[in-house]
Image (cartoon, rainbow, N blue to C red):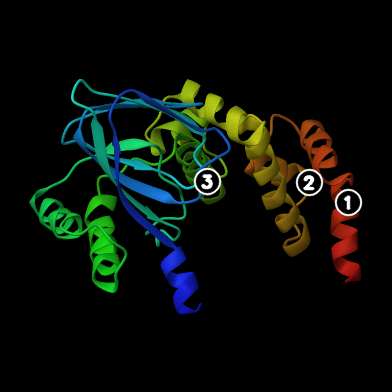
Amino acid sequence: MNDQEFYKSFAFHIFSFSGGHHRDNSAGVQYHYIGRMIKGRGLLVSEYKRLEVFEGEAFYIPNGCKYHSYWTGENGVSFYSLGFAYFPRNTQNSYQLQKLNFDEGSEEIFKKIADDCRVSLGNVGLLYSLLDNLEKSMSLDPIDRRSSMTERAIQYMYQNPLARMSEVAQACQMSESTLYSVFKKVLGKTPNEIHRKIQCEKAAELLKTTNLTIEEISRRLEFSSSSYFRKVLFSVYGKTPRQIRRESKLI
């Protein structure tokens, strides 16, 4: 990255409007933004959230967010806008449109940036110090949060293939109904379907690495019957238990 590209990665401004103002960002914004109201009121409306911000309040807009903003104030509107292309997050997930809570440290850092509010090496360094402070209290995007929940649940199923769905839900600190809802929204499948697939993977491993009978494997993985075990295994692999075992010995 050359100097020109580096400086284009940031956009620091103070925006001011004398009256009401509407901005259409329904195509999605180019940067992440940290904003802070100086005076007036802002209303940001995305597909999933309605965020109202007032004088002195700070807010975050994620890169790519599609929204409309409405700005009003008897004495006009003005706010700081710190745009940045790269967010080095401590998590794989994204953060949602939200208000930001400035502690004493964040307040001090922001004031230093606001002194001249221009893109400079010093202000860029301060921006990322501010992000490091704020990230601890920022809320994840609901979609990403659901994805994290399903990942946690699936990991628990792998570690505990005999677990009931009520146990999986409890281990992930959610209700059983929420577990089913999250799986349906994120994966388009029920937890039971994923659980059966995991059990079949365990069964295939036992078929390939042990001399246990099909009935013994069926009982060990708590299938209701060996015939049901064969049926489920075939639905996942398109093969019978004997075919899976036979093929493993040919490799």
Secondary structure under tag 2 reads: helix
Residue at (82%, 32%) from the top-left corner?
227
Q: Amino acid at mark 2?
A: Ile
Name the spot of residue 113 as percent of width and height, x first: 20, 59
How many numbered marks appear?
3
Residues under labels 1 and 2: Cα distance? 8 Å
**In the picture shown, does residue 224 fall above or below 197?**
above
The residue positioned 83% from the left and 34% from the top of the image is 231
- x and y percent of residue 60 in the render? 34, 42
| Residue 36 quadrant | top left
Determine if residue 231 is in view.
yes
- Give the labeled residue for mark 1: 242
Disc on res. 151: 3
Q: Which mark is residue 156?
A: none
58 is higher (above) or lower (below) than 208: above
**In the image, what residue type sits under mark 1?**
Arg
Q: Cβ–Cβ below 8 Å for labels 1 and 2?
A: yes
Sequence-first tag of 3 and 2: 3
Q: Is residue 140 left or right of residue 77?
A: right
